[in-house]
Structure formats: C-alpha cells, structure tokens
Image (cartoon, coloured by chain):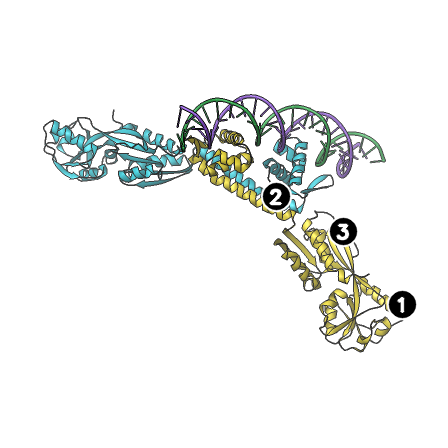
Chain colours: A yellow, B cyan, C purple, D green
DNA sequence: GCAATCCATAACATTATGTTATGTAATGTG
DNA sequence: CACATTACATAACATAATGTTATGGATTGC
C-alpha cells in the first residue's frame, strides 16, 4: 500500500492524545478533517485502528503496533529535516581539499578551524601533495577544490587566481635589514635561496636580475617557500618568498623587507569544471580568499 | 519544512536514474509531473538539487547527501508496510496467554506450535498459574486471554465455555478395564483420585455417587487432572478426568473408559470486556476451540 | 431532562498532483 | 551541416487528497 504522510500524522496525533478533537488542534485543522483522514487510513490499511468506547476513540492493539513503527517513520523524517537545514544553512556536509604541503601546516589550518567552528556539522579531508597530484585529483573530482601555485591552466579546471605579495627575507641582524626596500643590486653579493628553476615565479625573479645586469647568485633550490624561510631564519642566504609564508616566520630569526621590482606569487584555487558546485565549498573558498586579503598584491 | 512523500519519491527516482524521463516511467506518471514535483521540492528545501548538464540532470552534492537520508525514510516506510501486512493478515504481533499449569505442558503447546508455524511474525507469552491469578491478569488486561476451568463468571470478563468430555481412567491390566462403560457401582471398592473438593467438578462427581447410594472412596485430592493421570498410570487407584488430559496418557500405563453418568468438565476461555479485540488473539482462540472438538461433551 | 462534548458524515472549497500540448536546448545521424 | 530525436520546463486544464462549515447522533455531566 501507498502511505500518505498526512494520514500518518492524523493517526499518530489521535493515537497519542486519544482524541480526534485534540489531534485536530495539534495538526491545525478542523475535527472533521482528522476524522476523514483516519477513516481513509483505516480503509487503506485494511483493519480497524480505533474503537469507539464511551464516546471517545481507543486505539486497537493493531494500532499500538503501528504507532511504534509510524513513530520511526517520523523520526527518519526529522533526521531528513535536520540534514536539509544543515545543507541549506551550509552548516553540514563534507569537503575534500587538496593543497600544497606548505599550506597544510601554515596559514590554511587557522582559516579552516575558524570556518569549521561556525559549522559543527561540517567535516573535512585535507590532503597535502604536489601540484601535479592536486590538479589530477581536482580534475577527477576526487577533491572538491585544490590550492596550488604556478598553475598554467587546464580546460577541465576553473580557477580563482590570487596574486600574493612577495618580500625579501634576510637573516635577523643582516646589514641589509636596515634598508626599507631591497633591490636586485642590493643582493648582488648575496647567496640566493629560490624556488624551482622551472617555476613561473623563478623565471620572473631571475629576469629581474638579468634585466638590470645584476648577477643572480643561485645557492639552494627549494620546492616550498617555507623551506626557504627555514634556511634564512637559521642565518643563511637571502630569498624572495610570498608574504604569506614570510608572515609565519616573523620574529623567528628573519626579517622581511619589500622587494623592488614588485613581484607577485600567484596562488590558484582550483575547482573541477564538471561536477557540482557544493555551496559549502564555495563558502569555504570565499572565506579562504578573504583571509588572504592582507597579503594581496596591488 | 513539511515533506511530501510524492516529492521524495520523484527526487529519489530522478537521483538514482539520472533522468526525469526514467523517473516518470518508474513512478508511472508523465515526465512533466516529475519535473513539477522536483521543482516544487527544490523550492521547498531551499537549494538546488540538480544541475542541467549536457541536456540531462546531475544531482548536486547536497542532493547526494539528501538521497542517503531519503532512502532511510523509505526504508522505514517499507518496515511500516511489512508490519501493516502482518497485522492485516494476522501473521504478526504478540499475544499473552495465561493458562492453568496443566495446559502449559499438555494439549496447548501443540496447538500453539501449529498456530505459530503459520505466522512467523507472531510471538507469545505463555504464563501458567492458578485460576485466581488468571482471572486477575485478564481483568487487568495484563494478558490477552486466559484458559481456565470451573469459572463462575465475572462482570468484567467475557467468556467462551467449552464442555470437555470426562472419562474414567484405570491402571493398565485392571479387571474393570474389560468393561465398556464404568459406573459408580463399579468403583464402589476402588480408591478414587479426584480434583479439589471445592471445585465444581468434584461436587458434581460426588453427587453422582451419593445419589446412587454408592460410597465414594476418597483417596487423593489433586489440583490438576494431569497429576491424577500420573498416579493412575503408576498402578494406583482410579479417577474421573477430562478426556483431554487422559488422551495425553493413552498407552502409558493406563486405560480410559467412558463414565456413566456422562459428566462434563467446563473449560473457559476468558477475555477482558474492556480493552481492544486483537484480531490475532481472536484467531488463536478460534484455533484453540477447534482443536478441542474431538473432546467436546455432546 | 437539558447542555456540553465528541465523533461521523455531507456538501462544498482549496491545494497537490496528474494529464496533454508545446517550446527550448542538446545530441546524434545521414 | 541540417534535420530528427531526446530530455527537460512550462502552460492550461483535470483529478484526487485534504481542507472548511454545517449538521446529526451518541455519550457524559450537571
């Protein structure tokens, strides 16, 4: 048989109150409406649910068995409503984020924690990995979004690019620390810790030096700006890194100064073109982008 | 929000097939009917459930979360339908039967077993006790029905009386075993095992003897006919018991012969006047009465 | 004995869900 | 590349479920 929710509501209210009149009040309809719903329901189930005794209705024992099961139906509907509300208010669900390794231990956790505190029903998978893997996962929709850098584009990916300011970092107490702005000329005699040679950022940086006829003293190539920061904070070399990473090391063995010319390091937030647009994930991306405002390159 | 089952059905069918047209076929309605139900549902929940891609609908991630919970709703409705069917076909439910102690170990278990084999969803509480307790429990609706004897009536109880034939039982090989019918005169020199002196049946039995001027040689008073049967089957005395109990001992150390005058022993099936009339219990009572037909006193 | 209360039913109204018809967009095929 | 086919959305109308008020019968309370 095909149940009608309204009939189940009328049945439950009547069985629990022992009164059609009370049930009508609870359901916000007239008494004859409940009477009709009950009669229709009894016909549909194929047996009596109530007997009339001393003017009022008494549930049959069959009705009592049904009531327990009907209550479970409403329990499951209540769970559905809870989920609906969580989804509508974006306070529930799961999102999978792939990011560069440095992100999993620096700026991102703080942003995520703040985001999640306001959304008790939300859970997250945060997976650090190489840019190639991030791209692969996002394209295959194994992850809802990826946070990477140096992204050159892909037809299956939609992106949000965020140009992050870069700064020159020097060991604390370094003579150049007295200058307000560092130029390539200033670094002519310094050993440079820099990102991968084939990265977009590196090409731009080296170009600055060569355009000005200043030698670029390559010392150590690193994969992550955080590694460069670690070297410099231990008193070795100089580096041009994103202000985001530098901020994590502020007051920890290094100083940061604006670098001229003013380069930006492009972060990219990736989303698959295919697949859906989970509102929750869009909310998170917005929050993440907002958290980067202090580091935005003008 | 207030869910509509039909909308949930349309949603689930569409999410599972990926097609409004397929969902319409599954639900047995036209395609625009499903389209409308989905639109109404999406408006009601407050977020998009499907996106149109390459001409067909793709569930959003919110929809996928909802689908799991909607499936649970339908699971609970399926359980409700199973219960409804069991109750309608009286193949499910629970009944509580109070009976005289002898019944719990004799005729009744066989009848119950046969009744329950055909009704896998039915469970039973079978509680043996004294007639006074049986009456009390049934009146208080702690038990659905009681099987007792010598019941003199009560305003709060409705009853079905079943007169059971009685027979004279003698140890196997007894000289009187050669007779077709036993009379009080035949028992003038026999020790009699009999029921409680204050029971209706005993009064009737003793009256038979005294009316004929035959001495009644009282030997042992017992509470249950089964106890009397046990004594006689071990070669001691004679007794007049219900044919029901005697049948259990047939070929086990005793023989049974009709007793003249023809007395009956009244069993009573009790039901509370108040409370409901569980169809299952009424079915059982009918089956039980039917099982007693071979022992009915004409 | 009458008033109040509870429930069932009738007649009519409203809303949810159904239909057919039609339009738009995307895909497949010759 | 043009046309046929398929999928989905919307309009207009029809049907069924659920709502209303009015009313009657039965029971209870004063």
Q: Toward the viewer: B211 or A53?
A: A53
Q: Position of residue D27 (x, y in %)?
A: 40, 29
Left or right? Give the position of B135 relative to B220. right
Q: Toward the viewer: A272 or B128?
A: B128
Quadrant occupied by the N terminus of chain B: top right
Badge 3 and badge 2 in a common chain: no
User: Where is mark 1, residue-wise?
Assistant: A211
Q: Position of residue B228 (x, y in %)?
A: 20, 38
Left or right? Give the position of A278 relative to B100. right
Contact between labelled residues 3 and 1, with CB atoms less than 8 Å apart: no
Give how far apart the Cα atoms at labels 1 and 3 are: 34 Å
Q: Residue at x 56, y 44 (%)?
A: A78
Q: Tell me the crowding category of disc 2: few under 14, some 14 to 19, or many 20 or more residues within 10 angstroms, Cα based.
A: many
Q: Position of residue B14 (x, y in %)?
A: 65, 38
- The chain letter for the residue carrying disc 1 is A
User: Where is mark 3, residue-wise?
Assistant: A158
Q: Residue at x 62, y 34 (%)?
A: B26
Q: Is A146 rendered above or below residue B69?
A: below
Q: Earlier in the sequence, mark 1 or mark 3?
A: 3
Quadrant occupied by the C terminus of chain B: top left
User: Where is mark 2, residue-wise?
Assistant: B67
Left or right? Give the position of A179 relative to B12. right
Left or right? Give the position of A269 relative to A88. right
Disc 3 is placed on an element classified as strand
Q: Is residue A291 visible?
A: yes
2 or 1: mark nearer the eye: 2
Disc 1 is placed on an element classified as helix
Image quadrant in which you'd find residue A292: bottom right
Q: Is A247 rendered above or below residue A118?
A: below
């Amino acid at each position: 048989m095909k149940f009608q929710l309204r009939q189940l509501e009328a049945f439950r209210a009547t069985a629990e109150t022992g009164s059609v009149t009370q049930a009508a009040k609870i359901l916000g309809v007239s008494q004859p409406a409940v009477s009709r719903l009950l009669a229709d329901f009894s016909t549909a189930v194929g047996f009596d649910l109530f007997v009339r005794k001393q003017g009022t209705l008494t549930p049959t024992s069959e009705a009592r068995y049904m009531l327990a099961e009907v209550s479970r139906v409403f329990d499951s509907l209540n769970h559905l409503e809870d989920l609906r509300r969580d989804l509508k208010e974006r306070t529930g669900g799961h999102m999978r984020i792939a990011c560069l390794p440095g992100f999993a231990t620096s700026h991102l956790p703080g942003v995520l924690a703040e985001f999640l505190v306001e959304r008790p029903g939300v859970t997250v998978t945060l997976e650090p990995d190489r840019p190639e893997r991030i791209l692969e996962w996002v394209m295959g929709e194994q992850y809802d979004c990826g946070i990477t850098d140096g992204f050159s584009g892909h037809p299956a990916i939609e992106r949000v690019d965020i140009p992050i300011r870069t700064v020159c970092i020097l060991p604390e107490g370094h003579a150049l620390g007295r200058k307000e702005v560092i130029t390539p000329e200033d670094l002519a005699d310094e050993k440079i810790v820099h990102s991968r040679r084939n990265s977009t950022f590196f090409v731009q940086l080296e170009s600055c030096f060569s355009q000005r006829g200043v030698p670029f003293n390559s010392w150590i190539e690193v994969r992550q700006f955080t590694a460069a920061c670690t070297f410099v904070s231990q008193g070795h070399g100089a580096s041009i890194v994103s202000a985001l990473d530098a901020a994590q090391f502020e007051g920890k063995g290094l100083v940061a100064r604006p670098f001229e010319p003013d380069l930006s390091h492009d972060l990219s937030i990736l989303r698959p073109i295919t697949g859906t647009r989970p509102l929750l994930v869009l909310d998170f991306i917005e929050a993440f982008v907002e958290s980067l405002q202090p580091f935005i390159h003008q």
